[in-house]
Amino acid sequence: MTTPSTCPRCATETAPGVRFCPRCGQYLAAVPLHRQPPAPIEEPPSDLTSFADPVDRYRCRIPLRRILVMTVLSYGLYLFYWAFLTWKRYGQNTGEGISPSMEALSLAVPVFGWARVAAHVRAHRALAQKAGAPWRVGPKRAALAFAIVTALAWTPLVLRLDGAISFMDAIAFGLLGVAMVAAVAGLLWSLQRDMNGMWSKVQGNKLLDAPVWAGDVATGLAGCLVWADTMLTILSAPYRAGI
C-alpha cells in the first residue's frame, strides 16, 4: 500500500506521506494507487445562464401556441415582430449583413412585401436543405398567402375613406379583419413549424422556448386597441359617425 497523491473521496491533491486528506479527512494510507478518484459531476447550465448573452435570445424556439395566441391578440401585427426576430436569428447564425428592422417594415409595402416574404422563405429553406431538415412551405405559396393577407388588411382602410360607415359596413370590415388575422396565423404557424425543426437540426440540441419579450407585449397591446376600435365601430353609431 502506498499513499496516493489525490484523495479518492473529494479529489483534493495531497502531499506525499500525508495519511489523511486535509479537506475531508479521508484516511489515505491504506488506499492502493490504482484506485481512481471519482470524476467530478458537472452541473448542466440552467435555462437562465444558458441564454444570459443577449445574442442568444434569438436562438430560442418560438412555440407554435404562442404564434397563434399572439397573432390573434395583436390583430395580425405580430407578423412584423416575428419577421424581425426570424431575420435577426438568421443573420446571427449565418453572418450575413441583414437589417431585420428594414425587412420587417418592408412587409407594409404592397407588392414589394410579397417579394420580401418569398425571399425570407427562400433563405430559410436553403439553410434547412443544407442542414438536412424538412421544409414544407415554398416561396411562391408564402408570397401568395401574404398577398391575400395584404388584400384583406388594406380593403377596409381604403373603403373607410369613402365617407360615413354604416352598421353593415362595420360588420363587413370586422369579418375582413377576422379573415386577415386567420390568414396571418396560418402563414406564421406553417413557417415557424418548419423553422423550429430546422434550428433544432442546425444547432444539434433541443431548443428552449423563447421568453416573452417587450416586442410581444407591445404588439399585443397595439392589437388590443385595434380590436377595441373594431368592436366600437360595430356596436356604436356615434363612434361610426365620428370616424
Image (cartoon, rainbow, N blue to C red):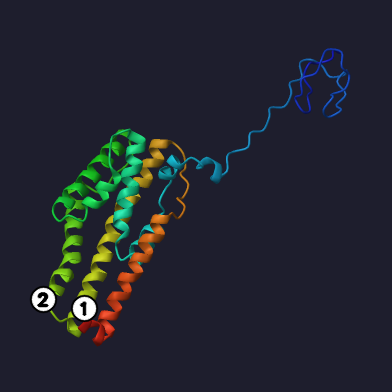
- Residue 150: give its label: none
Name the outermost residue toward the left. 162
Where does label 2 land, which residue? 162
Q: Residue at 24% of width from left, 65% of height from top? A: 180
Q: Specify the quadrant that holds the N terminus.
A: top right
Snapshot quadrant of residue 38: top right
Where does label 1 land, which residue? 243
Element on which disc 1 rests = loop
Q: How many marks?
A: 2
Amino acid residing under circle 2: Asp
Q: Position of residue 210 (x, y in %)?
A: 45, 50
Nearer to us in this view, 68 or 93? 93
Snapshot quadrant of residue 25: top right
Residues at marks 2 and 1 touching, judged by CB atoms closer than 8 Å: no
In space, the residues marked 2 and 1 are separated at their CA atoms by 11 Å
Name the outermost residue toward the bottom. 237
Q: Position of residue 152 (x, y in %)?
A: 18, 66
Amino acid residing under circle 1: Ile
The tag earlier along the polypeptide, 2 or 1, is 2
Q: Position of residue 201 (x, y in %)?
A: 39, 38
Seen in the picture, residue 227 relative to 51 is either above or below; the reply is below
